[in-house]
Image (spheres, rainbow, N blue to C red):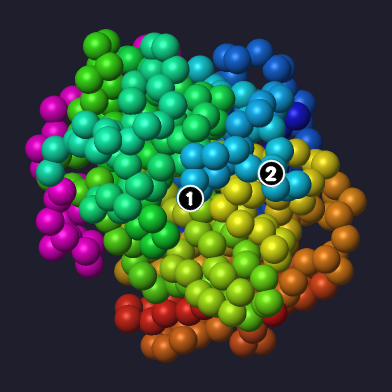
């Protein structure tokens, strides 16, 4: 079964700006969600056909694959298997991220000429593993980083077949393929195929580093760091007594929600809000789990458990070409359609922390009891220098 093809409200707001070239008040415009629970064949070769791929639109999470049993778990901080009751089988890997693809064209210029973090110096060459002991299945390409590295790269499920790469736990980085990696909260991967110009189909899986026929990795955007600080203007403020994990989708990549940002009890965590110069102008999307969740629950999941694609909330955010940042919150329809209790979910409100924040009519953007202040979710515009928090209560 394919999960929700969700487009958060930020998508509509940013699309209006891109299409019109006029900075207006797009906040009340909401994209209607497509139909859900669309079955697809369980074979490995599945074409990604999401219609959500347009400039400055938050990436929809559409890993069109069927989950398969696996003993691996999505553990963020340790390579040991998880015992969490929330952990569910990962999605079957799509072949487009491990099949033979054309190597990247030579690229020596930065793609971040106008972003605020352009002064961040590119880190050096690709490491050689830094002494890690992560899993490397036969025929796989070794993950080049260890924990706590200077590049802000975060290994994911290093004890599984992915061996640390930002791929499904049962998916390997292979020669002649692109292999994405995850970055720390508030940072985004600045490496992708510079020749990829389609939002879905060919190239939409080509994030991270390229492994040639001999498994030798190369850095496509040589003048960019591996991980770059995002806009830094949105965070989660968790007032609950338990931790909550926000799981970002991998895009370009297989679009599974496996990159964790965890807000501890009573704490905060930065969200990776990407600048307008991010790949093809796309933005970030996060599936936000129930209270008591951790990085281990950043998995695709299934309809039996309220995690990942069936988490209660979807957050989105990104900077548009007008210079404004658009952030949004939406109650996930898949959560309720699967029969999970609305009373188990906390409430969320976007609160302005400073600067010029433009709210929808009524001056509020929040979701309580499974309903949001604007139908299907709401969007807040952050002007230059403004910042806001997704407050969980």
Cα–Cα span, label 2 and label 1: 14 Å
Helix, strand or loop for the magenta stretch, by majority: loop
User: Toward the viewer: 21 or 1?
Assistant: 1
Decide: is 9 above or below 168.
below
Q: Quadrant of the C terminus?
A: bottom right
Which residue is at 70% across, 47% downward?
Answer: 84
- Say which mark, if any, is on residue 83: 2
What percent of the width, then of the height, locates residue 181? 38, 39
Q: Within 10 Å of the Cα at label 1, are there few (<14), some (14-19), or many (20+) other Cα atoms?
A: some
Left or right: 115, with 385 as reference point:
left
Residue 108 painted magenta: yes
Q: Magenta residues?
A: 98-123
Instruction: Name the residue that disc number 1 marks.
Output: 77
Q: Within 10 Å of the Cα at label 2, are there few (<14), some (14-19), or many (20+) other Cα atoms?
A: few
Which residue is farthest left? 108
Left or right: 33, with 54 as reference point:
right
- Say which mark, if any, is on residue 69: none
């Amino acid at each position: 079964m394919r999960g929700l093809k969700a487009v958060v409200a930020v998508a509509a707001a940013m699309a209006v700006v891109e299409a019109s070239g006029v900075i207006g008040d797009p906040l009340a415009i909401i994209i209607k969600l497509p139909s859900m629970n669309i079955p697809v064949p369980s074979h490995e070769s599945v074409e990604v056909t999401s219609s959500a791929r347009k400039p400055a639109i938050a990436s929809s999470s559409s890993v069109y694959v069927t989950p398969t049993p696996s003993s691996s778990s999505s553990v963020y901080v340790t390579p040991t298997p998880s015992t969490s009751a929330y952990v569910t089988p990962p999605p079957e890997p799509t072949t487009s991220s491990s099949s033979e693809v054309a190597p990247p064209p030579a690229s020596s210029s930065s793609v971040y000429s106008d972003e605020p973090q352009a002064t961040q110096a590119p880190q050096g060459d690709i490491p050689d593993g830094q002494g890690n002991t992560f899993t490397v299945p036969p025929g796989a390409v070794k993950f080049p980083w260890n924990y706590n590295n200077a590049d802000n790269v975060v290994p994911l499920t290093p004890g599984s077949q992915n061996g640390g790469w930002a791929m499904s736990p049962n998916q390997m980085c292979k020669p002649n393929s692109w292999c994405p990696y995850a970055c720390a909260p508030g940072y985004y991967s600045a490496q992708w195929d510079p020749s990829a110009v389609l939002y879905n189909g060919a190239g939409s899986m080509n994030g991270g580093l390229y492994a040639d026929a001999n498994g030798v990795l190369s850095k496509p955007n040589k003048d960019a760091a591996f991980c770059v600080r995002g806009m830094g203007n949105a965070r989660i403020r968790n007032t609950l007594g338990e931790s909550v994990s926000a799981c970002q989708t991998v895009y370009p990549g297989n679009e599974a929600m496996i990159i964790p940002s965890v807000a501890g009890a009573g704490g905060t965590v930065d969200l990776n809000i990407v600048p307008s110069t991010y790949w093809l102008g796309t933005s970030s999307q996060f599936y936000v789990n129930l209270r008591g969740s951790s990085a281990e629950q950043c998995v695709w999941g299934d309809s039996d458990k309220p995690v990942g694609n069936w988490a209660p909330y979807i957050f989105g955010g990104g900077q548009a070409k007008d210079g404004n940042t658009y952030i949004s919150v939406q109650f996930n329809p898949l959560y309720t359609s699967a029969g999970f209790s609305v009373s188990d979910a906390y409430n969320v409100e976007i609160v302005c922390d400073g600067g010029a924040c433009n709210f929808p009519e009524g001056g509020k953007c929040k979701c309580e009891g499974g309903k949001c202040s604007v139908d299907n979710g709401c969007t807040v515009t952050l002007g230059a220098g403004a910042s806001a928090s997704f407050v969980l209560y």
